[in-house]
């Protein structure tokens, strides 16, 4: 729920940025209950708090269509939250370990956020850290409760057979491809002085091969690559991760072998292979835990959407758009 809202907001922000200057509309504000869920009101304060978060990121005025999208996202989030609270019932009470309930965490968050009468963003670093820690703990608690509910009511689990099946179907994609640990010198080919660049590359290669200059020093002084500061070291790369002409040469070199100058349409390269890692087949025992997490997360998202849809269908929900308008409206 929270992740979906964040993604929606980010996409909306991107669309505003790409649209350029657009005639603005003030963000929505509520003056009364924004919705009723099974007879219980969702107050204006909860809705307005979400709009204030959006305003901090985008400013007070945004296009009308986008303002309505944020309004709808906020309503969905608040309604889903209310439905979940009701569905999870009293499972949020103090657990057997004696840890605080979510209500107690909420109270601590409220007290910290209003301590000394300062806004959270202006609070001392230590106080902000405590607020963030409590928010994180509250989020983990909620996710654990949701998972427990989905396991109990919807059968949230992944079998060993499913993990094995995924591995077998994707074995070739899970294999570790051949890699070389590479360092390189790059000299860009100037249209008006290509021969001079070729000659400088040849002399550099001969100086390195003859022991007159180290690869590191040559990279530091002669290369125009982004890796110049690291003495030309690129690290381990796959064949598809570097320029094709360079890869064709590099993946034929032995460990600690230096290449002669390699010319591409845009530059001349000199490379040295420091190490090689051969292609390695995927091993089920090494990947099983990660695959299980992946499948479980996918299943969790599917069942969560199903659960929310079931809750919506079973609940009596009324949305009060008449109580929502742009800031400054009379009603």
Image (tube, rainbow, N blue to C red):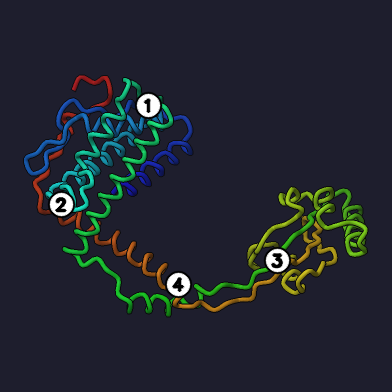
Residue 296 in the image, given as x and y percentages of width and height: 32, 65
Label 4 vs 1, first from the N-terminus: 1
Residue 91: which disc? 2
Is disc 4 placed on a helix, strand or loop? helix
Q: Looking at the image, is 3 positioned above or below residue 177?
A: above
Is disc 2 placed on a helix, strand or loop? helix
- Image quarter for residue 105? top left
Give the residue number, with chain letter if any, for mark 1: 61
Relative to 258, is 76 on the left or the right? Answer: left
Q: Residues within 10 Å of mark 2 (few under 14, many from 20)?
A: few
Residue 95 in the image, given as x and y percentages of width and height: 18, 51
Label 3 vs 2, first from the N-terminus: 2
Quote the CA–CA distance across marks 4 and 3: 30 Å
Q: Nearer the viewer, mark 2 or mark 4?
A: 2
- Image quarter for residue 319? top left
Q: Nearer the viewer, mark 2 or mark 1?
A: 2
Quote the CA–CA distance across marks 3 and 2: 58 Å
Quote the CA–CA distance across marks 4 and 1: 49 Å
Q: Residues within 10 Å of mark 3 (few under 14, many from 20)?
A: few
Quote the CA–CA distance across marks 3 and 1: 49 Å
Residue 244: which disc? 3
Whether label 3 touches label 2, CB < 8 Å? no
In this view, the residue farthest toward the left is 39
Q: Nearer the viewer, mark 3 or mark 2?
A: 2
């Amino acid at each position: 729920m929270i992740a979906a809202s964040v993604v929606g907001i980010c996409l909306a922000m991107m669309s505003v940025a790409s649209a350029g200057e657009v005639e603005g509309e003030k963000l929505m504000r509520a003056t009364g209950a924004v919705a009723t869920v099974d007879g219980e009101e969702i107050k204006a304060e909860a809705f307005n708090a979400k709009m204030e978060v959006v305003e901090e990121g985008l400013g007070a005025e945004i296009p009308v269509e986008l303002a309505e999208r944020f309004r709808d996202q906020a309503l969905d989030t608040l309604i889903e939250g209310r439905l979940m609270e009701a569905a999870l019932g009293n499972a949020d009470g103090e657990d057997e370990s004696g840890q605080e309930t979510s209500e107690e965490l909420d109270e601590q968050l409220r007290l910290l956020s209003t301590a000394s009468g300062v806004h959270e963003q202006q609070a001392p670093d230590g106080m902000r850290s405590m607020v963030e820690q409590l928010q994180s703990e509250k989020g983990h608690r909620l996710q654990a409760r949701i998972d427990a509910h989905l396991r109990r009511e919807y059968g949230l689990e992944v079998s060993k057979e499913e993990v094995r099946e995924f591995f077998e179907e994707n074995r070739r994609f899970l294999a570790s491809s051949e890699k070389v640990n590479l360092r390189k010198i790059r000299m860009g080919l100037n249209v008006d002085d290509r021969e001079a660049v070729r000659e400088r590359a040849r002399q550099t290669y001969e100086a390195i091969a003859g022991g007159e200059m180290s690869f590191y020093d040559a990279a530091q002084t002669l290369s125009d690559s982004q890796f110049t500061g690291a003495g030309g070291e690129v690290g381990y790369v796959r064949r598809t991760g570097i320029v094709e002409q360079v890869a064709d040469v590099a993946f034929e070199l032995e460990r600690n072998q230096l290449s002669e100058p390699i010319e591409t349409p845009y530059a001349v390269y000199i490379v040295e292979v420091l190490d090689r890692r051969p292609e390695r087949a995927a091993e089920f025992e090494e990947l099983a835990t990660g695959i299980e997490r992946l499948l479980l997360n996918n299943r969790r998202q599917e069942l969560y959407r199903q659960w929310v849809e079931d809750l919506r269908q079973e609940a009596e929900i009324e949305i009060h758009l008449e109580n929502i308008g742009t800031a400054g409206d009379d009603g």
